[in-house]
Image (cartoon, helix red, strand yellow):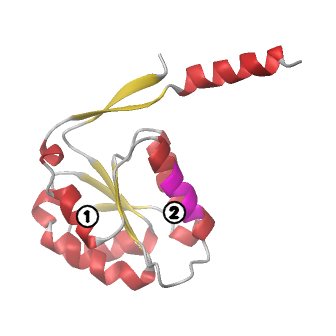
């Protein structure tokens, strides 16, 4: 079995992240979708989480700031199955000191088949999807089997 089927539950775990130049946009987006977001568990990186909570009264569990490891913390929760969706308003016109961390987060979300919205339009499409109100099954690589196959190949090459 090369793939495993995982279920994203009806109540989603949504990570909210924004670069400094996009924080206001994400806060406005959260205000516009407050009713839907209030049905789900929300988390986010440092300042973004605090600012969303202050502006919307939505409870957002805060991690570290992105440059101080917050993106890595969100990525770890993806691996643990504790983040189902990432809304990440990134700023493509500003250099980011923690760009490798951002790339690592996006990569791990792809590996685990996690929906990612990186701007208002994609976030609007995602939040209005019928899947937001139901369970969703998706397939990911069977990592244990993959590791075992790779180990056998290494043993044969000795």
Residue 149 in which image quadrant: top right
Q: Nearer the viewer, residue 140 or 68?
A: 140
Label placed on residue 123:
1
Inter-mark Cα distance, 1 to 2: 20 Å
What label does residue 25 carry, if any? Answer: none
Q: Main secondary structure of the magenta part?
A: helix
Q: In this image, 8 relative to 10: left or right?
A: right
Q: Position of residue 60 (x, y in %)?
A: 31, 62
Q: Nearer the viewer, mark 1 or mark 2?
A: 1
The reply to whether the C-beta atoms of the residues labelled 1 and 2 are less than 8 Å apart is: no
6 relative to 66 in the view: left or right: left
- x 55%, y 61%: residue: 103
- As drawn, the residue found furthest toward the right would be 158
Nearer the observer, 65 or 124: 124
Check the image and report above or below for 67 versus 103.
below
Local packing at callout 2 (Cα closer than 10 Å; few below 14, some 14-19, many 20+) is many
Tag 1, which secondary structure? helix
Quadrant holding the C terminus? top right
Query: Where in the figure is residue 5, as x and y percent of width and height?
Result: 36, 26
User: Residue 86, how many percent across, how many down?
Assistant: 36, 56
Residue 44, picture quadrant: bottom left
Q: Is residue 106 magenta?
A: yes
Magenta range is 101-107
Other-residue count near label 1 (Cα within 10 Å), few / some / many at <14 / 14–19 / ≥20: many
Label 2, on which residue?
A: 70
Nearest to N terminus: mark 1 or mark 2:
2
* Vertical relation: 117 (above or below) 54: above
Position of residue 49 measured from the top left corner of the image (x, y, whole percent): 36, 69
Say above or below: 9 vs 70.
above
At a point 51% along the width and 65% down the height, the residue shown is: 64
The residue drawn where x is 55% and y is 28% is 143
């Amino acid at each position: 079995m090369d793939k495993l089927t995982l279920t994203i539950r009806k109540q989603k775990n949504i990570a909210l992240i924004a670069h400094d130049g996009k924080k206001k946009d994400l806060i406005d987006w959260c205000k516009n979708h407050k009713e839907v977001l209030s049905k789900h568990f929300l988390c986010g990186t440092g300042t973004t989480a605090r600012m969303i909570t202050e502006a919307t009264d939505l409870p957002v569990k805060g991690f570290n700031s992105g440059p101080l490891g917050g993106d890595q913390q969100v990525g770890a929760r993806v691996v643990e199955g504790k983040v189902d969706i990432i809304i990440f308003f990134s700023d493509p016109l500003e250099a980011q000191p923690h760009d490798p961390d951002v790339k690592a987060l996006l990569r791990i979300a792809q590996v685990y088949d996690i929906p990612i919205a990186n701007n208002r339009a994609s976030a609007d499409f995602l939040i209005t999807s019928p899947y937001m109100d139901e369970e969703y099954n998706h397939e990911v690589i069977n990592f244990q089997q993959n590791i075992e196959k790779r180990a056998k190949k290494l043993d044969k090459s000795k």
